[in-house]
């Protein structure tokens, strides 16, 4: 269910709509992807910086956050692989 915006409209204004990359080159798409990664990194660091008093604390907090993200990612991949193996075993019968 869509949540209405402040103006009461369901669709965002054009200036907030996602960029259509369908007509962009591979290089432009890669650049957009890298920009999104960089923006995400900056948001994470900004959130962690609010809790940290020094650069050393920030680095430690980022390492901890990243380790947690990778553990969650690994768990997700393991679960997906188990499901794929179960489906293969079921399909083989």
Image (spheres, rainbow, N blue to C red):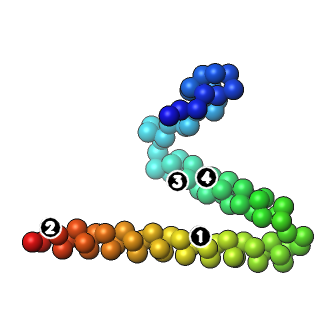
On screen, residue 1 above or below 55: above
Residue at the spot of label 4: 36
Per the image, label 2 sits on a secondary structure element best described as: helix
Residue at image location 66% in from the left, 56% down from the top: 40
Classify residue 57 by image quadrant: bottom right
Res. 31 in view = no
- Look at mark 1 in the image and give the residue it sits on: 69
Dot 1: few (<14), some (14–19), or many (≥20) neighbours within 10 Å?
A: few
Q: Nearer the viewer, mark 4 or mark 3?
A: 4
Q: Which numbered mark, 1 or 3, is in the foreground of this view? A: 1
Circle 3 sits in a helix, a strand or a loop, which is it? helix
- Asked if the residues shown at circle 1 and circle 3 are in contact, with their CB atoms under 8 angstroms apart, the answer is no
Q: Is residue 83 above or below residue 26?
A: below
Position of 37 with respect to 24 (left or right) is: right
Disc 2/disc 3 C-alpha distance (Å) = 38 Å
Residue at the spot of label 3: 30
Query: Residues under labels 1 and 3: Cα distance?
Result: 23 Å
**N-terminal of the two: label 1 or label 3?**
3
Position in image of residue 81 (x %, y %): 34, 72
Distance of mark 4 from mark 3, alpha carbons? 10 Å
| Left-right relation of 10 to 47 | left
The answer for how far apart the CA atoms under marks 4 and 2 are is 39 Å
Q: Position of residue 64 (x, y in %)?
A: 69, 76
Between discs 1 and 2, the one toward the N terminus: 1
The foreground one among 27 and 61 is 61
Q: Earlier in the sequence, mark 1 or mark 4?
A: 4
């Amino acid at each position: 269910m869509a949540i209405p915006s402040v103006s009461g409209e369901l669709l965002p204004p054009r200036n907030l709509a996602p960029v259509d990359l369908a007509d962009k080159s591979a290089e432009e798409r890669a650049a957009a992807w890298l920009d999104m990664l960089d923006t995400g990194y900056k948001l994470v660091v900004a959130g962690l910086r609010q809790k940290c008093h020094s650069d050393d604390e920030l680095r430690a907090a980022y390492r901890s956050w990243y380790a947690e993200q990778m553990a969650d990612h690994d768990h997700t991949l393991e679960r997906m692989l188990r499901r794929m193996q179960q489906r293969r075993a079921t399909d083989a019968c």
